[in-house]
Amino acid sequence: MQPQTKAYDIGCPTGTTLKQMSKLMPENVSLVGIDDSEEMIVKCREKLDSLTLGIEIELNMVDITKDVPVQQVSVVTMVLVLQFARPINRLEVVKRYSMGLSKTGRLSSSKKSGCWK
């Protein structure tokens, strides 16, 4: 992880991935969660606020298929997210988030079987 960068969890419904990421991130890396559901953002914030994580986590309600300014990013995770994007938009979503990665940054995505069909 490069100092002064961000780590994004795209599709952060209840904050489980953000919680685990917070245990691994150095102090000088910011965590950002993005979800397109206000209800999930509220649940995520409630869950994260109930924990003692020692790190501030920014949450944003955003449609992942829209233009999201992502820059100075070390890590992007997309856990079971892409199947919710229209097939025609999936590659563009991955490209968009990849463009904001630092030179040593990484994007990690997991999917259900058949997502790319």
Image (spheres, rainbow, N blue to C red):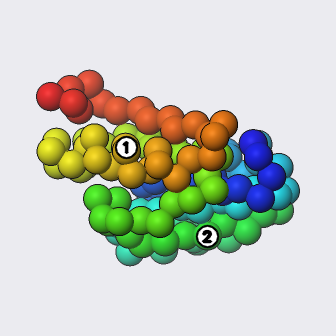
The residue identified by callout 1 is 94
Label 2, label 1: how far apart the Cα atoms are: 21 Å
Mark 2, mark 1: which one is toward the viewer? 1
Residue 43 image point, x, y percent: 49, 68
> At 26% from the left edge and 43% from the top edge, which residue is drawn?
90
Horizontal placement of 107 versus 29: left or right? left
User: Dividing the image into 4 quarters, which one contains the N terminus?
Assistant: top right
One can see residue 53 in this view: no
Outermost residue toward the front in this view: 103
Residue 93 image point, x, y percent: 33, 49
Horizontal placement of 16 versus 78: left or right? right
Question: How many marks do you count on the picture?
Answer: 2
Please, what secondary structure does the residue beneath circle 2 have?
strand
Query: Looking at the picture, which amino acid does disc 1 mark?
Result: Val
Horizontal placement of 104 versus 42: left or right? right
Mark 1: few, some, or many residues within 10 Å (few <14, many ≥20)? some
Q: Nearer the viewer, residue 96 or 54?
A: 96
Horizontal placement of 93 versus 88: left or right? right
> At 82% from the left edge and 58% from the top edge, which residue is drawn?
28
Residue 41 image point, x, y percent: 46, 70
Q: Nearer the viewer, residue 86 or 37?
A: 86
Mark 2: few, some, or many residues within 10 Å (few <14, many ≥20)? few
100 shown above or below 116: below
Please, what secondary structure does the residue beneath circle 1 have?
helix
92 shown above or below 117: below
> At 52% from the left edge and 53% from the top edge, which residue is drawn?
100
The residue identified by callout 2 is 58
> At 84% from the left edge and 56% from the top edge, which residue is drawn?
27
